[in-house]
Amino acid sequence: MSKAEQKIKRVLTALQDHKEPDRVPLTDFYWSGFLSNWKKAFNLPEETDIYEYYDLDVKVISPNMDPKVESCVILEKTPDYVVFKSGFGCTVKKMFDAPMPMFLDFSVKSAEELLNFTFDDPRDDRRYFEKRCDIINCGDSFGTLPSFAEDIERNKDKFCLFGSICEPYETMWRIRGTEGLLLDLAMHPEKIKAFAQKVTDFMLGIAEREIELAPLTGMVIWGDVAYDKGMFFSPKLWREIFFPCVKRLCDFIHSKGLITIYHGCGRSLEIFEDLIEAGVDVYNPLEAKAGMDPVMLKKRYGDRISFFGGIDTRLLGEGNWEEVEKEVLYKLQAAKGGGYMPASDHSVASNVDPVIYDKLIGLLKDKGRYPLSV
């Protein structure tokens, strides 16, 4: 069995079958600032891949899924920042010493304009075979990545690979802006519902082409519809507008023999039953500050859904090793019987000490072996 096949088996045993593999599967998402600090801390070559270095199991590789293929058109550039227009039509400012970009303006100003917004061909070869500088792949940096196809070829024999797509809300706020979209949801829900179906059609086209080009095990669906206190809008509205779209995405992914990971930040407990009904197999990232405790959630939902994430990034960035160790050993209880992949509760940020993170991975590999003793 090849290394990739071993990792695929480990991931599916834990997350799909809800059983115990040899050890808990591992992966994470990383800010570019952390990766830079990590390489400096351990005197590593610039080309070092953290996933290979720690022999992690899962790698998520995404194509350019911007509505317009032409992404990141530079409007202004200085030594300190760059201003660009993204393929979503929004104008974005990226300060090179800041972790995330600022959204300055949105080209769509009304629900009516949103309905008239058009998407480029989801199967356009440029999305998959040209270098990527789109907003989803380069959200906390402004660099150029290898093409989707090149990244797949480089990693297909090393990792359990997942592709990714966005559900409609995640797509629409980048086109309309959060304030404008929330206003439209309240005043013009039928128009938003109609556009959500167009977004879903587009993302299904992206997913179909990813699956054709890559040996994927699953697909991540990006969908932030909540913050740390609850939903951005009513659960009733989510069920009416977005549930049918998420179900269509999950149904298609399952029809291709893949599993689904739904990445939803914040406290989305009010729609958790709906996400399970829609076909979500794994929920991520389980933000600690939002009360998304994987140990507690597994007790309630663990026979119907698996979990990925949950390790408090506030502790990773600001706590000492004893606090981090206590957090990890507690969260690993969710892995008893399978059904859990430990990771940060969003991504590994720039303020995380590389030495602490290195010890964290060592602890997960040591204590994450079955039978667990935590």
Image: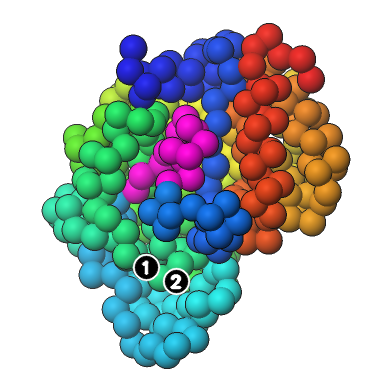
Asked if 114 appears above or below 74 in the picture, the reply is above
Q: Quadrant of the C terminus?
A: top right
Mark 1 highlights which residue? 143
| Marks 1 and 2 close (CB-CB < 8 Å) | no
Q: Amino acid type of disc 2?
A: Arg
Residue 118: which numbered mark, if any? none
Q: Amino acid type of disc 1?
A: Gly
Q: Nearer the viewer, residue 268 or 155?
A: 155
Residue 352 visible in the picture: yes
The residues tagged by marks 1 and 2 sit, at their Cα atoms, a distance apart of 25 Å
Mark 2 highlights which residue? 176
Q: Secondary structure at mark 2?
A: helix
Residue 337 relative to residue 117: left or right: right
| Res. 305 image quadrant | top right
Q: How many marks?
A: 2
* Residue at image location 52% in from the left, 36% down from the top: 54
Q: Which residues are magenta?
A: 49-62
Q: Per the image, is 14 magenta?
A: no
Residue furthest to the front in view is 43
Residue 112 visible in the picture: no
Which callout, 1 or 2, points at the residue further toward the start of the chain?
A: 1
Q: Nearer the viewer, residue 242 or 215?
A: 215
| Res. 152 image quadrant | top left
Q: Per the image, is 51 magenta?
A: yes
